[in-house]
Image (tube, rainbow, N blue to C red):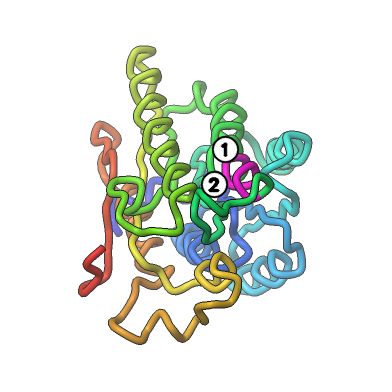
């Protein structure tokens, strides 16, 4: 996209980048010439991705760690600052969730979901903003879900609640920054069904990756990455607040 050229050489942090949507976004940002810090717990996957993209000249930084731990997040931002500079673009993609009803849900799953889906992106935003205020332009993108807009799927009520929280947090952050007159844009992307590892993990293996394709063509990580590039490509005075994106055929 033509408007993305201005981001070349600038610094992005993508959380949850060891697979799926996060990996797709990291590839796209590296493709437009950004310096990309990739964060996740699975270091071996991050190392492989950085090595692959580095062969094409991409500047990558592996930040292995758990975004659910404040110490790890602080270390990530310190490493980026030390290696390059402050972050220009933050993509909060890391997420989790488990299939269960509220009646049968587990306390530890609820706490983990809130920590990774809500507290972790808030923490990353806090740390990113420390350097973003001095930028001539910056962008924060939070990954939510179509179910952060409509609550229609049973057995995922707590996951959906966390995505509603992301939506509220994103809207509030945008209002707070507008009051300060900053040049920091805030957007959210809310996908429908995307073919990743998430579904199999969240359903304890009840659904396989192949089951994504049983009824219709689901979204692919590259589709979400294109939405990220679109947000970045718009002129600096344009703030795309939310992109809802679903595959054709997904009714819920």
Q: Position of residue 16 (x, y in %)?
A: 59, 56
Answer whether residue 173 is visible to the viewer in this image: yes
**Residue at (59% x, 63% y) in the render:** 58
**Residue at (73% x, 39% y) in the render:** 69
Q: Main secondary structure of the magenta part?
A: helix
Q: Nearer the viewer, residue 150 or 122?
A: 150
Judge from the rendering whether residue 121 lies leftward or rightward of residue 242; answer left or right.
Answer: right
Judge from the rendering whether residue 56 lies leftward or rightward of residue 187; answer left or right.
Answer: right
User: Is there a contact, CB below 8 Å, between mark 2 and mark 1?
Assistant: yes
**Residue at (46% x, 86% y) in the render:** 210
Q: Is residue 85 magenta?
A: no
**Residue at (69% x, 64% y) in the render:** 46
Q: Which mark identifies residue 109?
A: none
C-alpha gap between disc 2 and disc 1 = 6 Å
Range of the magenta residues? 109-115
Per the image, the residue denoted by label 2 is: 12
Answer whether residue 139 is visible to the viewer in this image: no
Q: Position of residue 54 (x, y in %)?
A: 65, 68
Q: Which mark identifies residue 87?
A: 1
Give the quarter of the figure containing the N terminus. Answer: bottom left
Q: Which of 186 and 236 is in front in this view?
A: 186
Identify whether 182 is placed above or below 73. above
Identify whether 84 is placed above or below 32. above
Q: Which of 37 and 147 is in front in this view?
A: 147
Within 10 Å of the Cα at label 2, are there few (<14), some (14-19), or many (20+) other Cα atoms? many
Identify whether 34 is placed above or below 178. below
Q: Position of residue 88 (x, y in %)?
A: 51, 38
């Amino acid at each position: 996209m033509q408007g993305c050229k201005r981001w070349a050489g600038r610094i992005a942090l993508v959380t949850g980048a060891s697979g799926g949507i996060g990996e797709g976004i990291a590839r796209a940002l590296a493709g437009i010439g950004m310096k990309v810090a990739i964060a996740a717990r699975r270091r071996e996957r991050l190392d492989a991705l950085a090595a692959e993209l580095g062969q094409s000249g991409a500047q990558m930084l592996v930040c292995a760690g758990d975004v659910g731990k404040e110490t790890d997040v602080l270390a990530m931002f310190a490493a980026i600052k030390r290696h390059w500079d402050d972050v220009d673009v933050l993509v909060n993609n890391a997420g989790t969730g488990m299939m269960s009803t509220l009646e049968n849900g587990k306390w530890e799953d609820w706490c983990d979901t809130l920590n990774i889906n809500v507290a972790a992106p808030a923490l990353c935003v806090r740390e990113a903003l420390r350097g973003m205020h001095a930028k001539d332009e910056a962008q924060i993108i939070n990954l939510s879900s179509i179910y952060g807009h409509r609550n229609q799927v049973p057995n995922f009520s707590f996951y959906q609640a966390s995505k509603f929280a992301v939506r509220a947090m994103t809207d509030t952050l945008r209002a707070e920054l507008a009051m300060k007159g900053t040049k920091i844009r805030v957007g959210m992307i809310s996908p429908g069904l995307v073919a990743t590892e998430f579904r199999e993990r969240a359903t304890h293996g009840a659904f396989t990756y192949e089951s994504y394709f049983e009824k219709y063509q689901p979204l692919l990580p590259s589709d979400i990455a294109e939405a990220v590039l679109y947000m970045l490509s718009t002129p600096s005075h344009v703030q795309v607040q939310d992109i809802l994106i679903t595959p054709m055929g997904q009714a819920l």
